[in-house]
């Protein structure tokens, strides 16, 4: 692992990229690759117990619908067949609920700042552009052999390589304990593992933390009960080899060891991608 000062600087840079430089624009429906991020184009902020719309990003689905404005309160999110009240949710937790695969729908219950009236708005998620990290960057890895990362257990007692899983479909999801929006994709992998026990011999689900403090990562795994995935760590200086500069990001690796898909974890439909690879 890098020394503490270097690791801290790299982690800080990741946080800055994630939280400061997001911008968004709509993409044509024929957009063929998964984006770095996907959602509806609203930035959130917390004010006391309320989650407010801090900004509506230009040319995003939220902007185009003309129903959501800065200062409006977000009361609930209806996504993936489940409605979630946001009163006690953090900004990161709410953002995770709003993000999802391009083309899927999410319904937001909005309390308008102007008159306290409630309105339900259904939006179709679109590709969001993250400044400095283009989807084309990820596309350059697709179809090529994946870098043979060295992964380790949190205590450093054991190590393994991605190549150890050659012959299986491998999902590698990069996350961090300090990244609240990273939690939902990892939770989805737990659900997929539970729903498809028949995939156990053909599919490897791996989460990889970029935390410098691995004790904190281990504590997060225990608290979240992520016990259906292989939960490992990677040294930050290896991430460049796989093109990971932000989290959450996931890579789908085909049985022959080539990259099948790479994208922001919220943008990928894990179950669909796995099924497609298993059918090959």
Image (spheres, grey):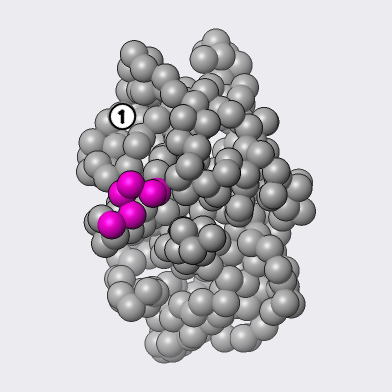
Q: Which of 273 and 94 is in front in this view?
A: 273
Secondary structure under tag 1 reads helix
Residue 254 sits inside the magenta stretch: no
Q: Is residue 134 visible?
A: no
Residue lying furthest top: 3
Q: How crowded is mark 1: few (under 14 residues within 10 Å), some or many (20 or more)?
A: many
**Residue 202 is covered by the magenta coloring:** yes
Q: Where is residue 29 in the image (x, y as percent from the top left)?
A: 69, 79
Q: From what the image shows, is residue 122 above or below residue 33? A: below
- Give coordinates of residue 250: x percent, y percent: 53, 48
Q: Can residue 76 be seen in this view?
A: yes
**Number of marks:** 1
| Magenta region | 198-203
At 50% from the left and 37% from the top, the residue drawn is 166
Residue drawn at (49%, 85%) of the image: 122
Q: Position of residue 280 (x, y in %)?
A: 54, 60
Q: Which of 42 and 161 is in front in this view?
A: 161
Residue named by callout 1: 218
Residue 1 drawn above or below residue 153: above
Q: Is residue 4 left or right of residue 111?
A: right
């Amino acid at each position: 692992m890098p020394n503490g000062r270097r690791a801290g600087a790299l982690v800080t840079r990741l946080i800055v990229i994630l939280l400061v430089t997001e911008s968004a624009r709509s993409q044509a429906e024929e957009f063929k690759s998964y984006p770095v991020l996907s959602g509806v184009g609203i930035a959130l902020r917390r004010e006391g117990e309320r989650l407010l719309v801090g900004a509506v990003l230009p040319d995003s689905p939220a902007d185009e619908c003309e129903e959501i404005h800065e200062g409006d309160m977000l009361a609930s999110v209806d996504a993936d067949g489940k409605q979630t009240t946001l009163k006690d949710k953090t900004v990161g937790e709410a953002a995770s609920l709003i993000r999802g695969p391009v083309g899927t729908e999410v319904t937001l219950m909005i309390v308008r700042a102007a008159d306290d009236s409630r309105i339900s708005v259904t939006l179709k998620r679109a590709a969001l552009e993250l400044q400095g990290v283009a989807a084309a960057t990820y596309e350059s890895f697709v179809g090529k052999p994946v870098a043979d990362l060295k992964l380790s257990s949190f205590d450093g007692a054991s190590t393994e390589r991605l190549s150890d899983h050659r012959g299986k479909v491998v999902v590698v999801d990069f996350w961090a304990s300090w990244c609240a929006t990273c939690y939902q994709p990892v939770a989805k992998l737990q659900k997929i593992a539970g729903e498809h026990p028949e995939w156990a011999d053909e599919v490897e689900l791996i989460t990889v933390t970029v935390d410098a403090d691995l004790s904190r990562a281990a504590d997060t795994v225990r608290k979240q009960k992520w016990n259906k995935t292989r939960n490992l760590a990677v040294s930050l200086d290896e991430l460049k080899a796989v093109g990971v500069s932000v989290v959450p990001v996931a890579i789908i690796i085909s049985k022959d060891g080539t990259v099948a898909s790479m994208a922001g974890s919220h943008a990928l439909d894990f179950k669909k991608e796995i099924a497609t690879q298993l059918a090959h």
